[in-house]
Image (tube, rainbow, N blue to C red):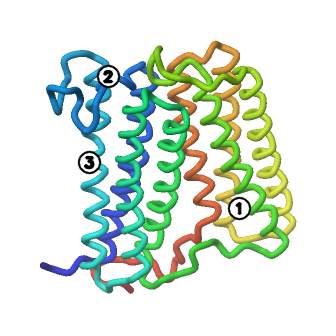
């Protein structure tokens, strides 16, 4: 088997990252269309058919399950080709294997979700593990484009490190509280799905506060960065995160005050993934312009 150039392997990793982002949205469509129990069994769709698209709900749920095959294929390609990359790098090998472990965990969790009638804790775990997978895939993609191993995390001025850590914790907290709102609200995947017994306005306010704290920390970081005069790439990463976070907050408040329509909820989920990617962009070490793989062998 021929050796694979670093540039080609980077494309493979980008494909894996993209598929992991897309399946979050297809999973959201299952929940938003009330198709969570379109297939009542697992791994078969039902007790007589492995694949069933006889109704709209079963077709949507089945489509999401089948797309898992696309994700699995892209992740397996990332693993197998990490051993054929020239030069072979151990950091890329074990990062790619982390995706395999994550996908296997997701398959098991997906089965638990169905077999427990869309248990809210299992649904939350399904989404949060997806975020972990996206973070690993993002790091793999970014590192795959460099000729040599680099630091995993961005080099940040010492005066800003504490704020970046606090910001990262706030961002993750906002995502977690968002899953609690979803598990409490009307779009749990089925009319018969078990939901948390919390008051929706209360959990929505808590989530809103975590988002406001997150945005406030980004603004504070932007102001301090302006004084610190960090690298242009770091400044651009802060700006990108701020824009996405503000847009996401605006969508969130709009959907809440308009009765959580499906279209806005779907946009909010896309925004959550975008915000998380922007946070990863801020935290993960960028590609050094002097070590980017140009073509063929690494330079």
What residue is rendered at 59% in x and 67% in y? Answer: 284
- In the image, residue 25 lies at what x, y percent? 43, 36
- In the image, residue 286 lies at what x, y percent? 56, 70
Residue matched to label 3: 70
Residue 235's tag is: 1
- In the image, residue 19 lies at what x, y percent? 35, 49
**Camera-side mark, 1 or 2:** 2
Name the N-terminal-most of marks 1 and 2: 2
Q: Is residue 113 left or right of residue 285?
A: left
Q: Is residue 279 left or right of residue 109?
A: right
Check disc 2 and report its element: helix, strand or loop: loop
Residue 128's tag is: none
Name the N-terminal-most of marks 3 and 1: 3
CA distance for labels 2 and 3: 20 Å
Name the N-terminal-most of marks 2 and 3: 2
CA distance for labels 1 and 2: 46 Å
Residue matched to label 2: 38
Check disc 1 and report its element: helix, strand or loop: helix
């Amino acid at each position: 088997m021929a050796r694979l150039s670093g540039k080609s392997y980077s494309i493979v990793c980008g494909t894996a990252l993209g598929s992991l982002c897309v399946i979050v949205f297809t999973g959201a469509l299952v929940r938003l269309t009330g198709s969570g129990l379109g297939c009542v069994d697992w791994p078969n769709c039902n007790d007589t058919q492995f694949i069933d698209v006889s109704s709209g709900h079963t077709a949507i749920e089945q489509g999401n399950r089948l797309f898992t095959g696309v994700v699995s294929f892209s992740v397996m390609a990332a693993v197998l080709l990490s051993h054929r990359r020239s030069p072979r790098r151990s950091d890329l090998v074990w990062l790619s294997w982390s995706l395999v472990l994550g996908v296997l965990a997701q398959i098991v969790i997906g089965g638990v979700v169905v077999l427990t009638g869309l248990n809210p804790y299992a649904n939350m775990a399904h989404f949060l593990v997806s975020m972990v997978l996206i973070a690993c895939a993002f790091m793999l993609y970014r590192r795959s484009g460099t000729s040599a191993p680099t630091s995993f995390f961005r080099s940040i001025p010492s005066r800003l490190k504490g704020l970046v850590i606090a910001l990262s914790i706030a961002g993750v907290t906002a995502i977690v509280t968002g899953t609690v709102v979803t598990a409490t609200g009307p779009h749990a995947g089925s009319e018969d799905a078990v939901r948390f017994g919390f008051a929706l306005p209360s959990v929505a306010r808590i989530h809103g506060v975590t988002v406001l704290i997150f945005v406030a920390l980004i603004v504070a970081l932007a102001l301090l960065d302006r004084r610190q005069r960090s690298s242009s790439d770091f400044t651009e990463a802060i700006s990108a995160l701020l824009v996405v976070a503000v847009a996401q907050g605006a969508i969130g408040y709009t959907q809440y005050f308009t009765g959580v329509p499906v279209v806005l909820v779907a946009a909010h989920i896309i925004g959550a993934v975008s915000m998380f990617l922007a946070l990863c962009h801020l935290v993960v070490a960028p590609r050094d312009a002097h070590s980017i793989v140009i073509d063929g062998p690494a330079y």
